[in-house]
Amino acid sequence: SQTIHQWPATLVQPVGSPLSLECTVEGTSNPNLYWYRQAAGRGLQLLFYSVGIGQISSEVPQNLSASRPQDRQFILSSKKLLLSDSGFYLCAWSSGLAGNIQYFGAGTRLSVL
Amino acid sequence: QQPVQSPQAVILREGEDAVINCSSSKALYSVHWYRQKHGEAPVFLMILLKGGEQKGHEKISASFNEKKQQSSLYLTASQLSYSGTYFCGTEDTLSSNTGKLIFGQGTTLQVKP
């Protein structure tokens, strides 16, 4: 069966520090991968998605970047965090076929202070 | 464009029914429904593909009217466990090869004893 792992679960970082969040998927190959951010009490904002290794599509211009160095690994990064980067970051995967379900990781709660 | 959900919030007593609506301005390939408990990741409920189908799972069902670009989630005889925030995610016909979903802002449902 397929599983998705995200870490860390919580993170507290000072303004201006770098960020690296990692997501890995097991039990499937060539998944579509997605990064979302959820501000407190708000909806899910799609940040990046990837349909293959090295292919990254950005949905919202911002202080973040994403990379997919391996088939089942998706990384969200920032060189210098802003206060507005605080939120709940969720990674998700799908099989890549139209209409297929997205499954979410447990998420990382990031507080930038 | 983000789909619009209504209502924004609902408070029910156990055993009462609720309807949550999701409306998009784009031609849709599919609509996905998720439920999120506080502090947790969204959990998949059901997917509806274009064709005007209706699906059901126990006391939770949904419909999809592709001509009107609308979907509705029906919760009957609500239980305490139904409490949470419900999100619709829409997949438009132009993005169907990426599996990309755009989520509505969410509907908060609270079921009281």
Image (cartoon, coloured by chain):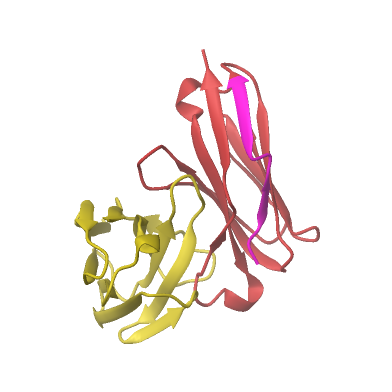
Chain colours: A yellow, B red
Q: What x and y, as percent, mark residue A10?
A: 22, 51
Residue furthest out toward the bottom? A54
Q: Is residue B48 left or right of residue A38?
A: right
Name the one closer to the observer, A76 or A85: A85
Q: Residue at x 43, y 47 (%)?
A: A40
Residue B76 visible in the current orientation:
no
Q: What x and y, as percent, mark residue A89?
A: 35, 58
Residue furthest out toward the left? A8
Residue furthest out toward the top? B113
Name the one closer to the observer, A86 or A44: A86
Q: Residue at x 56, y 36 (%)?
A: B108
Q: Is residue B5 left or right of residue A36?
A: right
Compared with residue A52, is residue B86 higher up or lower down, i.e. above or below? above
Residue A50 visible in the current orientation:
yes
* Residue B9 counted in the magenta span: yes
* Region in magenta: B1-12
Q: What x and y, as percent, mark residue B42?
A: 42, 47
